[in-house]
Amino acid sequence: MSKFSRIIWSLAILLIVSTTIVFSFGVLIVGAVTLSLYGLYRHYFPKKKFPKHSTRSQMYTFGEVIDIRSEEVHETINLKKIPK
């Protein structure tokens, strides 16, 4: 019975290892197929480009927008310069 038990356990371990290897390769193949299909989708259906002066480009998503006339900026820079 000892020999029979050892053979059964060896077969069980071999089955577990082979199942793990097959499952791992299956996951890799499914991931590669998914990525390639996504790449084909992006290639044949690219994002629509908005016109240059659309309302979307006028929106600011972050930061603060300060509207200063150029004359005021130059005057401020000239005032901050230290006379020699």
Image: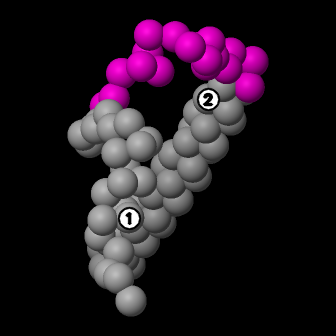
Magenta residues span 43-61
Query: Closest to the observer: 24 or 11?
Result: 24
Query: Closest to the observer: 67 or 52?
Result: 67
Establish if 55 lies above or below 41: above
**Circle 2 crowding by C-alpha within 10 Å: few under 14, some 14–19, many from 20:** few
Residue 65 visible: yes
Q: Which mark is residue 68?
A: none
Residue holding disc 1: 78
- List x then y, in percent, for residue 82: 32, 81
Residue at 44% across, 10% down = 55
Residue at 50% across, 54% down = 24
Q: Which color scheme did the rendering employ for the protein? A: one colour
- List x then y, in percent, for residue 17: 46, 64
Task: Give, as a three-letter code, the residue at label 1.
Answer: Asn
Residue holding disc 2: 38
Does residue 36 belong to the magenta stretch? no
Sequence order check: which comes first, mark 2 or mark 1? 2
